Amino acid sequence: MRRRYSCPSLRHVRSRHADFSLLSLKGNTMTNPSTSHWVEVEHARLHVEEAGEGEPITMLHGFLVDSGQWNNEFAALADSHHVIRYDARGFGRSTIEPGRYAHHEDLAAVLDACNVQRTALLACSGGAATALDFSLAHPERVSALIFVGAGYWGRFANSTPAARAFGQALASFDVNGLIDSSLRAFTDGPRRAQSDVDVAVRNHVEAMTTHLFKRNISYWTFATRDQRTPKPAALDRLHEVDAPTVLIVGREDQIEVHHLAKELRDGMPRARMIVAQGAGHHANLEAPAQVLGIVRDALSEAALRD
Protein backbone atom coordinates (compact mmCIF):
# COMPACT_ATOMS: atom_id res chain seq x y z
CA MET A 1 0.00 0.00 0.00
CA ARG A 2 1.37 3.40 -0.98
CA ARG A 3 1.14 5.94 1.81
CA ARG A 4 1.61 9.68 1.70
CA TYR A 5 3.96 10.99 4.35
CA SER A 6 2.49 12.76 7.33
CA CYS A 7 3.86 14.23 10.55
CA PRO A 8 0.71 15.73 12.09
CA SER A 9 2.18 16.16 15.56
CA LEU A 10 4.93 18.49 14.40
CA ARG A 11 4.94 22.15 13.50
CA HIS A 12 6.13 22.48 9.90
CA VAL A 13 8.42 25.37 9.08
CA ARG A 14 10.08 26.44 5.87
CA SER A 15 13.81 25.87 5.91
CA ARG A 16 16.05 28.80 5.11
CA HIS A 17 17.84 26.39 2.73
CA ALA A 18 14.65 24.95 1.24
CA ASP A 19 14.98 26.54 -2.20
CA PHE A 20 18.51 25.17 -2.63
CA SER A 21 17.50 21.74 -1.38
CA LEU A 22 15.03 21.35 -4.24
CA LEU A 23 17.91 21.25 -6.72
CA SER A 24 20.40 18.50 -7.31
CA LEU A 25 24.05 19.32 -7.87
CA LYS A 26 23.47 18.69 -11.57
CA GLY A 27 20.49 21.04 -11.71
CA ASN A 28 17.58 18.56 -11.75
CA THR A 29 14.47 20.06 -10.18
CA MET A 30 12.02 18.21 -7.98
CA THR A 31 8.55 17.57 -9.34
CA ASN A 32 7.23 16.80 -5.84
CA PRO A 33 7.22 19.55 -3.20
CA SER A 34 9.16 18.91 -0.02
CA THR A 35 8.14 19.70 3.54
CA SER A 36 10.55 20.75 6.28
CA HIS A 37 9.96 20.35 10.00
CA TRP A 38 11.76 19.92 13.29
CA VAL A 39 11.97 16.84 15.49
CA GLU A 40 12.68 17.52 19.15
CA VAL A 41 15.08 15.06 20.80
CA GLU A 42 16.96 15.30 24.07
CA HIS A 43 19.60 18.04 23.85
CA ALA A 44 18.89 18.84 20.17
CA ARG A 45 16.41 19.84 17.46
CA LEU A 46 16.74 17.92 14.20
CA HIS A 47 15.87 19.50 10.86
CA VAL A 48 13.98 17.00 8.68
CA GLU A 49 12.78 17.13 5.08
CA GLU A 50 10.30 14.80 3.37
CA ALA A 51 8.85 14.45 -0.10
CA GLY A 52 7.03 11.95 -2.30
CA GLU A 53 5.03 8.89 -1.45
CA GLY A 54 5.56 5.14 -1.59
CA GLU A 55 8.10 2.91 0.10
CA PRO A 56 10.36 4.95 2.41
CA ILE A 57 14.05 5.62 1.96
CA THR A 58 15.89 7.62 4.62
CA MET A 59 19.16 9.41 3.85
CA LEU A 60 21.95 9.92 6.39
CA HIS A 61 24.79 12.24 5.40
CA GLY A 62 28.51 11.95 6.06
CA PHE A 63 30.08 13.64 9.06
CA LEU A 64 32.01 16.27 7.11
CA VAL A 65 28.93 17.60 5.32
CA ASP A 66 25.14 17.78 5.88
CA SER A 67 21.90 16.63 4.28
CA GLY A 68 22.74 18.69 1.19
CA GLN A 69 24.91 15.72 0.23
CA TRP A 70 21.72 14.04 -0.96
CA ASN A 71 20.25 16.83 -3.11
CA ASN A 72 20.34 14.70 -6.26
CA GLU A 73 18.99 11.49 -4.69
CA PHE A 74 16.32 13.33 -2.68
CA ALA A 75 14.98 15.02 -5.83
CA ALA A 76 15.21 11.98 -8.09
CA LEU A 77 13.69 9.40 -5.75
CA ALA A 78 10.80 11.59 -4.61
CA ASP A 79 9.02 10.67 -7.85
CA SER A 80 8.68 7.06 -6.73
CA HIS A 81 9.37 6.89 -2.98
CA HIS A 82 8.70 8.59 0.31
CA VAL A 83 12.10 10.23 0.79
CA ILE A 84 13.36 11.48 4.15
CA ARG A 85 16.60 13.24 4.95
CA TYR A 86 17.73 15.13 8.02
CA ASP A 87 20.71 16.97 9.43
CA ALA A 88 22.23 14.91 12.22
CA ARG A 89 22.61 16.74 15.52
CA GLY A 90 25.31 19.37 15.29
CA PHE A 91 25.26 19.42 11.48
CA GLY A 92 23.51 21.65 8.95
CA ARG A 93 20.46 23.28 10.50
CA SER A 94 20.17 20.88 13.45
CA THR A 95 21.18 22.07 16.90
CA ILE A 96 23.26 20.38 19.57
CA GLU A 97 23.63 20.99 23.29
CA PRO A 98 25.73 19.28 25.96
CA GLY A 99 24.26 15.96 27.06
CA ARG A 100 24.46 12.26 26.34
CA TYR A 101 22.92 10.85 23.16
CA ALA A 102 23.25 8.16 20.49
CA HIS A 103 22.87 8.86 16.79
CA HIS A 104 20.86 5.70 16.08
CA GLU A 105 18.34 6.78 18.72
CA ASP A 106 18.00 10.12 16.92
CA LEU A 107 17.24 8.18 13.73
CA ALA A 108 14.55 6.22 15.55
CA ALA A 109 13.01 9.48 16.76
CA VAL A 110 12.95 10.90 13.22
CA LEU A 111 11.26 7.80 11.82
CA ASP A 112 8.73 7.73 14.66
CA ALA A 113 7.88 11.39 14.07
CA CYS A 114 7.35 10.69 10.39
CA ASN A 115 5.17 7.63 11.02
CA VAL A 116 7.65 5.35 9.26
CA GLN A 117 7.90 1.83 10.64
CA ARG A 118 10.27 0.35 8.05
CA THR A 119 12.70 2.01 5.65
CA ALA A 120 15.69 1.56 3.41
CA LEU A 121 18.72 3.49 4.65
CA LEU A 122 21.03 5.35 2.28
CA ALA A 123 23.99 6.48 4.35
CA CYS A 124 27.50 7.86 3.97
CA SER A 125 30.55 7.69 6.26
CA GLY A 126 29.46 8.45 9.84
CA GLY A 127 25.87 8.20 8.68
CA ALA A 128 26.59 4.58 7.75
CA ALA A 129 27.79 3.96 11.31
CA THR A 130 24.46 5.32 12.55
CA ALA A 131 22.56 3.12 10.10
CA LEU A 132 24.55 0.04 11.09
CA ASP A 133 23.85 0.59 14.79
CA PHE A 134 20.17 1.17 14.01
CA SER A 135 19.91 -2.00 11.93
CA LEU A 136 21.14 -4.06 14.87
CA ALA A 137 18.94 -2.30 17.42
CA HIS A 138 15.84 -2.41 15.18
CA PRO A 139 16.32 -5.06 12.46
CA GLU A 140 12.60 -5.20 11.74
CA ARG A 141 12.63 -1.55 10.70
CA VAL A 142 15.30 -1.83 7.97
CA SER A 143 14.45 -3.09 4.47
CA ALA A 144 17.85 -2.44 2.89
CA LEU A 145 21.21 -0.78 3.57
CA ILE A 146 23.07 1.23 0.93
CA PHE A 147 26.35 2.65 2.20
CA VAL A 148 28.60 5.19 0.47
CA GLY A 149 32.14 5.35 1.88
CA ALA A 150 31.05 3.65 5.10
CA GLY A 151 32.72 4.66 8.35
CA TYR A 152 32.47 3.50 11.93
CA TRP A 153 33.19 5.06 15.31
CA GLY A 154 36.87 5.05 16.17
CA ARG A 155 37.99 4.16 12.66
CA PHE A 156 40.01 7.03 11.20
CA ALA A 157 42.13 7.43 8.10
CA ASN A 158 45.75 8.21 8.94
CA SER A 159 47.92 6.70 6.22
CA THR A 160 48.32 9.83 4.06
CA PRO A 161 49.70 13.29 4.88
CA ALA A 162 46.32 14.97 4.29
CA ALA A 163 44.51 12.47 6.52
CA ARG A 164 47.07 12.95 9.29
CA ALA A 165 46.78 16.73 8.88
CA PHE A 166 43.03 16.42 9.39
CA GLY A 167 43.58 14.48 12.62
CA GLN A 168 46.01 17.11 13.86
CA ALA A 169 43.65 19.96 12.97
CA LEU A 170 40.82 18.17 14.74
CA ALA A 171 42.92 17.77 17.90
CA SER A 172 43.53 21.53 18.08
CA PHE A 173 40.27 22.46 16.35
CA ASP A 174 42.07 24.54 13.76
CA VAL A 175 39.04 25.52 11.68
CA ASN A 176 40.88 26.54 8.52
CA GLY A 177 43.10 23.50 8.81
CA LEU A 178 40.06 21.24 9.19
CA ILE A 179 38.43 22.63 6.06
CA ASP A 180 41.58 22.45 3.96
CA SER A 181 42.77 19.03 5.10
CA SER A 182 39.33 17.41 4.90
CA LEU A 183 38.97 18.53 1.29
CA ARG A 184 42.45 17.29 0.40
CA ALA A 185 42.03 13.98 2.22
CA PHE A 186 38.47 13.02 1.37
CA THR A 187 37.35 14.99 -1.69
CA ASP A 188 40.62 15.05 -3.64
CA GLY A 189 41.80 11.76 -2.15
CA PRO A 190 45.28 10.26 -1.90
CA ARG A 191 46.03 10.13 -5.64
CA ARG A 192 44.44 13.26 -7.11
CA ALA A 193 45.23 16.94 -7.21
CA GLN A 194 42.56 19.54 -6.56
CA SER A 195 42.46 20.27 -10.29
CA ASP A 196 41.43 16.65 -10.97
CA VAL A 197 38.13 17.09 -9.08
CA ASP A 198 34.98 18.58 -10.58
CA VAL A 199 34.89 22.22 -9.48
CA ALA A 200 31.15 22.23 -8.70
CA VAL A 201 31.46 19.10 -6.56
CA ARG A 202 34.44 20.44 -4.63
CA ASN A 203 32.74 23.79 -4.06
CA HIS A 204 29.58 22.08 -2.83
CA VAL A 205 31.52 19.96 -0.34
CA GLU A 206 33.59 22.95 0.74
CA ALA A 207 30.44 25.00 1.44
CA MET A 208 28.98 22.26 3.67
CA THR A 209 32.29 21.59 5.43
CA THR A 210 32.90 25.29 6.02
CA HIS A 211 29.43 25.72 7.52
CA LEU A 212 30.08 22.75 9.80
CA PHE A 213 33.46 23.77 11.17
CA LYS A 214 32.66 27.48 11.45
CA ARG A 215 29.61 26.89 13.64
CA ASN A 216 29.97 28.09 17.21
CA ILE A 217 28.87 24.63 18.40
CA SER A 218 28.83 21.55 16.17
CA TYR A 219 28.82 17.78 16.45
CA TRP A 220 32.59 17.79 16.71
CA THR A 221 32.47 20.09 19.76
CA PHE A 222 30.90 17.43 21.99
CA ALA A 223 31.48 14.18 20.07
CA THR A 224 34.12 12.58 22.26
CA ARG A 225 32.42 13.65 25.48
CA ASP A 226 28.70 13.11 24.90
CA GLN A 227 28.18 10.54 22.15
CA ARG A 228 27.16 7.05 23.28
CA THR A 229 27.91 4.07 21.05
CA PRO A 230 26.59 0.50 21.43
CA LYS A 231 28.51 -2.13 23.35
CA PRO A 232 29.52 -4.50 21.88
CA ALA A 233 30.22 -2.48 18.77
CA ALA A 234 28.42 -3.27 15.54
CA LEU A 235 31.69 -4.37 13.94
CA ASP A 236 31.69 -7.29 16.38
CA ARG A 237 28.12 -8.22 15.39
CA LEU A 238 28.19 -7.99 11.62
CA HIS A 239 26.98 -11.57 11.23
CA GLU A 240 23.69 -10.48 12.82
CA VAL A 241 22.88 -7.90 10.12
CA ASP A 242 20.21 -9.53 7.97
CA ALA A 243 19.29 -6.62 5.70
CA PRO A 244 20.50 -6.79 2.08
CA THR A 245 23.45 -4.40 1.88
CA VAL A 246 25.27 -2.62 -0.93
CA LEU A 247 28.65 -1.07 -0.10
CA ILE A 248 29.72 1.69 -2.50
CA VAL A 249 33.25 3.01 -2.15
CA GLY A 250 34.94 5.61 -4.32
CA ARG A 251 38.05 4.47 -6.11
CA GLU A 252 39.80 7.66 -4.96
CA ASP A 253 38.80 7.34 -1.29
CA GLN A 254 41.25 6.70 1.53
CA ILE A 255 42.61 3.16 1.83
CA GLU A 256 41.13 2.75 5.32
CA VAL A 257 37.65 3.29 3.86
CA HIS A 258 38.30 0.52 1.33
CA HIS A 259 39.51 -1.77 4.10
CA LEU A 260 36.39 -1.13 6.18
CA ALA A 261 34.11 -1.74 3.18
CA LYS A 262 35.80 -5.11 2.66
CA GLU A 263 35.44 -5.91 6.36
CA LEU A 264 31.73 -5.14 6.18
CA ARG A 265 31.34 -7.14 2.97
CA ASP A 266 33.04 -10.16 4.46
CA GLY A 267 31.22 -9.95 7.78
CA MET A 268 27.63 -9.21 6.71
CA PRO A 269 25.75 -12.21 5.30
CA ARG A 270 23.97 -10.32 2.49
CA ALA A 271 26.49 -7.65 1.54
CA ARG A 272 28.16 -6.85 -1.77
CA MET A 273 30.68 -4.16 -2.64
CA ILE A 274 30.87 -1.87 -5.68
CA VAL A 275 33.76 0.49 -6.49
CA ALA A 276 32.76 3.81 -8.08
CA GLN A 277 35.48 4.88 -10.50
CA GLY A 278 36.64 8.49 -10.48
CA ALA A 279 35.02 9.27 -7.13
CA GLY A 280 36.29 10.11 -3.67
CA HIS A 281 34.68 9.78 -0.26
CA HIS A 282 31.30 11.30 -1.16
CA ALA A 283 30.99 9.10 -4.22
CA ASN A 284 27.38 10.00 -4.95
CA LEU A 285 28.46 13.58 -5.71
CA GLU A 286 31.09 12.57 -8.27
CA ALA A 287 29.32 9.55 -9.79
CA PRO A 288 25.65 10.56 -9.38
CA ALA A 289 24.23 8.48 -12.24
CA GLN A 290 26.05 5.32 -11.18
CA VAL A 291 25.14 5.68 -7.51
CA LEU A 292 21.50 6.54 -8.26
CA GLY A 293 21.26 3.47 -10.49
CA ILE A 294 22.68 1.28 -7.72
CA VAL A 295 20.23 2.77 -5.22
CA ARG A 296 17.25 2.17 -7.52
CA ASP A 297 18.30 -1.43 -8.10
CA ALA A 298 18.73 -2.05 -4.36
CA LEU A 299 15.29 -0.58 -3.65
CA SER A 300 13.69 -2.72 -6.35
CA GLU A 301 15.34 -5.86 -4.98
CA ALA A 302 14.22 -5.02 -1.44
CA ALA A 303 10.64 -4.46 -2.63
CA LEU A 304 10.61 -7.87 -4.31
CA ARG A 305 11.80 -9.55 -1.12
CA ASP A 306 9.08 -7.82 0.91
Image: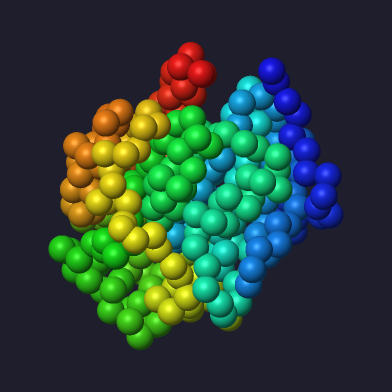
267 or 87, nearer to the observer: 267
Q: Position of residue 75 (x, y in %)?
A: 62, 34
- The quadrant in which residue 8 appears is top right
Q: Nearer the viewer, residue 239 or 11?
A: 239
Residue at the limit of the structure toward the top, as seen here: 304
From what the image shows, is residue 11 above or below residue 161?
above
Q: Position of residue 291 (x, y in %)?
A: 41, 32
Corner quadrant of residue 41: bottom right
Residue farthest to the left? 159
Residue at the image point whose x is 33% and y is 46% from the top? 149
Tell me how the rendering is colored: rainbow
Could you tell me which residue is drawn at 18 percent across and 48 percent down? 259
Please report the residue visible at 45 percent of the width from the left and 31 percent of the height from the top.
Answer: 144
With 124 as the anchor, is 262 left or right in this view? left
Position of 210 relative to 140 (above/below): below
Q: Position of residue 22 (x, y in %)?
A: 68, 41
